[in-house]
Amino acid sequence: MWDLSVEVVVFLVAAAFLGGFIDAIAGGGGLITLPALLIGGMDPVTALSTNKAQGVFGSATAAISYARAGHVDLRKQGRAALVALLAGGAGAMVAGRIPTGLLEMILPVVLIAIALFFALKPGLSDADRVRSASPLAVFFVPLVACYDGLIGPGAGSFYMLGFVMLAGFGILKATAHTKLLNFSSNLGSLLVFAVIGTPLWSVGLVMGAAAVVGARMGSRLAMRIGARVIRPLLVVTSTAMALRLIWQMF
């Protein structure tokens, strides 16, 4: 059992609330919660698995909030969600067993590219374009979900990019559809970590409660303001994740 001082509890609860809030709007909540767990003294695999334990609560809350408001039909995402569940579990199975140096070098470039895309591409709004979700289920979803199980931070931004570029969704609808897949890949990886026995459940549940509150507030703000808040926050979070990864390397 991990000993929790009052200071550590307050720190982790605040990180989970902020992570849930940001993740519900633009993804990237793991940028806040995963480093917080590492600062709390956990080894990387324990921090990753505990991060999944708290992350399922925030992503589930956001998915339900968007569905209740009519921005997404969760039943129509069943096949893609199953793919994300299985791929997230597959990523978790190899977490800690493969070298991630090359991935850490590539990710900052990809994240900066995502930030530039959302910052500079004209015409991005809440309006939908032509929809074709099949490339997501066939290729993009399993790739992102596997990354989510393996490492995690940034998966929401990657899902978002797929829904905008491949499925032609407007920014608000893309955000809404991202959340069920994020929940599924989180859950798939958590199930694997639970078998291995690495999550610290007490920490994950405490943080999960805070993430629920943050996710509800974040999803409400996104639905009220739409692309005006989602687009700039995507740029900021993607850039921040890239800079953090670069800082870790050097």
Image (cartoon, helix red, strand yellow):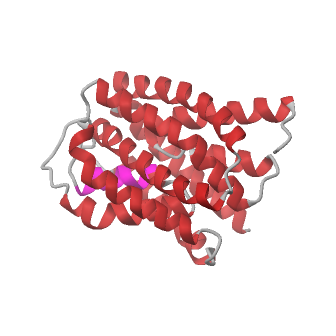
Front residue (pair 185, 226):
185
Residue 101: where, in percent of width, then height? 63, 76
Question: Along the horizontal axis of the image, is 61 left or right of 242?
Answer: left
> From what the image shows, is residue 187 above or below residue 90?
above
Residue 84: where, in percent of width, then height? 38, 57
Q: Residue at x 46, y 60 (%)?
A: 88
Front residue (pair 241, 15):
15
- The kind of secondary structure the magenta stretch mainly shows is helix
Instruction: Confirm whether the magenta stretch covers residue 168.
Output: no
Q: Is residue 131 visible?
A: yes
Instruction: Confirm whether the magenta stretch covers residue 158.
Output: yes
Residue 97: where, in percent of width, then height? 63, 76
Give the magenta-colored segment's residue range.
156-166
> From what the image shows, is residue 230 above or below residue 159?
above
- The answer to which quarter of the image holds residue 117 is bottom left
Q: Residue at x 47, y 44 (%)?
A: 27
Question: Along the horizontal axis of the image, is 68 left or right of 189?
Answer: left
Q: Residue at x 76, y 34 (%)?
A: 11
Front residue (pair 68, 199):
199
Question: Along the horizontal axis of the image, is 209 left or right of 136?
Answer: right
The furthest residue to the left = 130
The quadrant of the rendering that contains the C terminus is bottom right
